[in-house]
Amino acid sequence: MKIEILEETFTAIKSNGEEFTKSFYKNLFIKYPEVKPLFSNVVIEEQEKKLLISLVLVIDNLRNFTYLKNMLYNLGERHLQYDVISDHYPLVGEILLGTLEQHLGSKWTTEAQQAWTEAYNAIVDLMLEGAKEKYRPLSFYTKELKSNLMERLRIESLTRKYIRKNNSTDTIVQKLMKDTYFQEIQQQIGSAKTVKIISSIVQKINNRHNN
Ligand code: HEM
C-alpha cells in the first residue's frame, strides 16, 4: 500500500475536513438517495464528524496494522446494526473517491487514485471480515429482483428491520406484500408466486441473521 501518498493527500483533505465530509454526504445522497433512510436516526452533522474522525484514525494508523484491524473489525460489525449490507460498500467507495477527486484537484494523480482505491478496498475487506458471514453478497434473489440493485437493497434493509422486531415470517410477508415494489411484482407474476419469493427471501435472511 502506498502509505506516503495516502498520508500526503489526506493532509490536504484534513485541513478542510468538514467541507470534505459535508460534500461526501451531499454527493452520496444526490447520487444514491436510496441510502438516505439508513441515516434517518442520525444527526447528519454528527455523522460528518464521525466519518472524518474514523478516516483520520485509519490514516494515522496505517503503520499499526493490529490496531487498524481491530478498529475496522468492530466498525464492520456495528454496521450490521445500521442495516448496511455488502452491496452498499462499492457505492460509498465510488462517492468517497469522487469527493476526494473533487477536493484534491491537481493532487488527484493516477497514483493517488490507485492508492485510495487499494486502501478503500482493504478497509472494506476488514470491515466485512468483522461482520463475517452475515454480509455474504445476496445471490439468492429472483431474476426480477436481481435486475434492480436499489430495490434489492431496500428490501433487504426492510426485511432485516422486521426480523429484528421479531415479526413472524407470515407477518413479514404480509407487510412486504403491501410494499409498492411487490405490488408491482404481484401484478406481473401473481400473488401466489410473489408470496413464495418473499418467503424465501425472509427465510434466507433469517438464516444468515441467526448464524
Ligand atoms: C470505509 C467505509 C466506512 C467507514 C470508515 C464508516 C464509518 C462510520 C462511522 C465512524 C460511523 C459512526 C458510528 C460508529 O462508529 O459505529 C458510521 C455510522 C454509519 N455508517 Fe458508516 N462507514 C463506512 C461505510 C458505510 C457504508 C458503506 C454505509 C452504507 C450506506 C454506511 C452507513 C452508515 C450508517 C447508516 C451509520 C449510522 C447509523 C446510526 O448511527 O444509526 N457506512 N460509519
Image (spheres, helix red, strand yellow):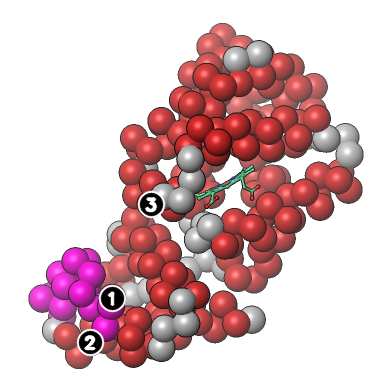
Q: Residue at the location (54% across, 28% down)?
A: 21
- Mark 1 vs mark 3: which is more N-terminal? 3
Is 188 within the magenta? yes
Q: Residue at the location (14% across, 84% down)?
A: 190
Give x and y (percent) for residue 96.
53, 33
Badge 1 amino acid: Leu
The numbered disc on residue 193 is: 2
Q: Secondary structure at mark 1?
A: helix
- Against 9, is 195 above or below? below
Give the residues in magenta.
174-189
**Residue under circle 3?**
37
Examine the image and state in which quarter residue 167 appears.
bottom left
**Residue under circle 1?**
176
- Against 12, is 65 above or below? below
Badge 2 amino acid: Lys
- Against 109, is 41 above or below? below
Badge 3 amino acid: Pro
- Mark 1 vs mark 2: which is more N-terminal? 1
Q: Secondary structure at mark 2?
A: helix
Q: Examine the rendering and report whether any part of residue 91 can be seen.
A: yes
Give x and y (percent) for residue 136.
57, 68
Q: Residues within 10 Å of mark 1 (few under 14, many from 20)?
A: many
Q: Residue at the location (71% across, 60% down)?
A: 130
